[in-house]
Amino acid sequence: MAVMYVGRAKQCAAVVAALVALSVAMASAQAPVERHVGALTLLARPNSADNTVAFHASWADGRSSDFTLLDVSEPPPATIPMRLYSATRLLIYTEGHLYIVDALAGSVIDNFYFLGGPRFSPDGRYVAFQRTISRGSSFGDAVYLVYDLEQTASANQMIPGGPFTGIAVFPEENRAMGLYHAAADESQGHQAQSPIVWISNRQFVFVDNLGEATKVVLVDVSQGATAAQVKEIVLNPTAVIYPERLATYQSPAKELNAEAIELVSAVETGITVRLRFHNASMYRVSSVDVRFTLP
């Protein structure tokens, strides 16, 4: 009888363990969430156990595909940002990580990490963002990159097979040398002082600082990211900020942060943008208009 009791106990224990495993699996694999992105219907099923989301993509004509992405479980699939540029260019991204998927084939074309973005051109073709800071780096430096969704993944890399993606359009040294890292130390590192703002399908603007020079930068990718045209205008920080209201360790140029940029006018001879500043006591004005002369 004792032997039979032990055998039944082992069976019970095995059943309990199986039930626990099943409940864990059911809790990890959540119910699918249906999303509609353009003409595409997506069923997204997150799995918290391995931090993945399984997607089933279907089209109105009956075509479908399946793919799984890692590191996209936050935010939840119901709110995760998605954009459909074309049938072979579905963009799914979280805070800092973007996937480009061929929704017809169910294959990941490219994926990369980013800062300060992603910012999409109005027609969706271009993605502007900042390069991430390398692990172990002793300083941060802003490098502004562009990804062209009409090009292949390899065409969007300056260094084939490397860990970074995108074509550098600013600073000039990164653009000219085709490097993701050009600054040797903190004194050479640029700092972003505004969001990146597209003002047309092929032009975007941002504010950048290096040392005591703060500039408004206009980038034009009409001829493609690798042939980007860049214009810069240096701002006078003391015309915007009260220097006497800053602490002794603060620099007017480095404190000149634009919280928003908007297009004022665009004509054949020039483009005017408006920088808007925080409503802080150190600012003399709430906005400044900057004109770029063309061509």
Image (tube, helix red, strand yellow):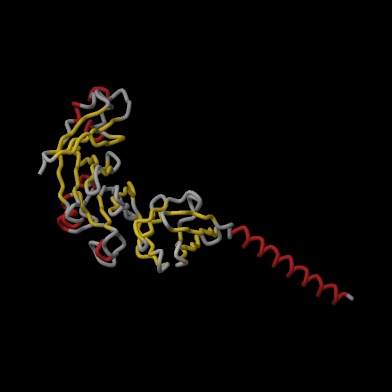
Please state the horizontal and vertical placement of residue 249, each as a whole percent of the image.
26, 31
Q: Front-most of 259 and 243? A: 259
Q: Is residue 274 above or below residue 44?
A: above
Farthest residue, direction front: 61
Tell whether 70 sits left or right of 25: left
Q: Position of residue 284 (x, y in %)?
A: 24, 23
Is residue 145 visible in the rendered image? The answer is: yes
Depth check, front residue: 281 or 129: 129
Q: Is residue 130 visible?
A: no
Q: Quadrant of residue 157?
A: bottom left
x, y percent for residue 84? 38, 56
Q: Nearer the viewer, residue 289 or 281?
A: 289
Question: Looking at this view, is 73 or 58 the one in front?
Answer: 58
Quadrant location of the N terminus in the rendered image: bottom right
Image point (69%, 67%), residue name: 18
Residue 173 image position (x, y, % from top left): 16, 52
Q: Residue at x 45, y 67 (%)?
A: 63
Q: The C terminus appears in which quarter of the rendering?
A: top left
- What count of labels does the image hold? 0
